[in-house]
């Protein structure tokens, strides 16, 4: 998995509407979605680690252990009767070129 370029904003960089640079004539609206990460905690853990495991590179054993424990705890908090589900949010920005 390749890392995103460092010049890109973090995933939560636009979490607040005030962080958006709104152009004249543009509109923005929030958008939310429930995201399915797997049928159970073990599958969700494997999925998330497979997608984001590169973020653990460079951590020592203790740091890696803390990160994995935090991931397991987060996943455990999102287990539902339908599997592991997280809420996701984004902004839809519409603009026209002048």
Image (cartoon, rainbow, N blue to C red):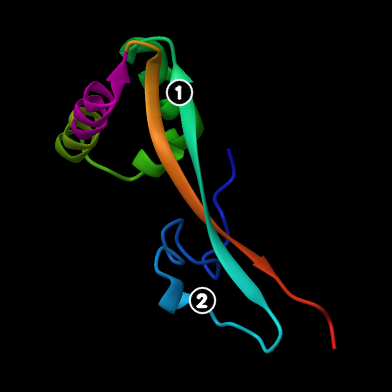
In the image, is residue 71 part of the stretch drawn in magenta?
yes
Q: Is residue 87 above or below residue 10?
A: above
Q: Quadrant of the C terminus?
A: bottom right
Pick whichever, 81 or 69, lies toward us: 81
Rounded to the nearest whole Å, what is the CA distance between mark 2 and mark 1? Answer: 28 Å
In the image, is residue 89 part of the stretch drawn in magenta?
no
Residue 38 is drawn in which quadrant? top left
Magenta stretch: give its range. 70-80
Pick whichever, 84 or 63, lies toward us: 84
Residue occupying the point 40% across, 38% down: 87
- Disc 2 is placed on an element classified as loop
Task: Tell me, for residue 20, which label it has, or none.
Answer: 2
Question: Marks 2 and 1: which is nearer the front?
Answer: 2
Task: Tell me, for residue 37, which label it has, or none.
Answer: 1
Q: Say whether residue 90 is left or right of residue 44.
A: right
- Disc 1 is placed on an element classified as strand
| Image coordinates for residue 12, horizontal then vertical, percent | 41, 59
Q: Is residue 64 above or below residue 58?
A: above
Q: Is residue 43 above or below residue 48?
A: above
| Image coordinates for residue 74, horizontal then vertical, percent | 24, 31
Circle 2 crowding by C-alpha within 10 Å: few under 14, some 14–19, many from 20: few
Residue 55 is drawn in which quadrant? top left
The single residue placed furthest to the right in the displayed view is 98
Residue occupying the point 23% across, 21% down: 76
Pick whichever, 51 or 38, lies toward us: 38
Does label 2 or label 1 sit earlier along the sequence? 2
């Amino acid at each position: 998995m390749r890392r995103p370029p460092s010049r890109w904003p973090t995933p939560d960089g636009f979490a607040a509407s005030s962080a958006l640079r709104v152009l004249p004539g543009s509109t923005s609206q929030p958008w939310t979605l429930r995201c399915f990460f797997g049928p159970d905690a073990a599958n969700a853990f494997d999925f998330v680690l497979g997608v984001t495991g590169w973020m653990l590179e460079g951590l020592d054993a203790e740091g890696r252990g803390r990160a994995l424990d935090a991931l397991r705890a987060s996943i455990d908090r999102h287990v539902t009767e339908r599997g592991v589900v997280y809420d996701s949010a984004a902004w839809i920005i519409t603009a026209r070129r002048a």
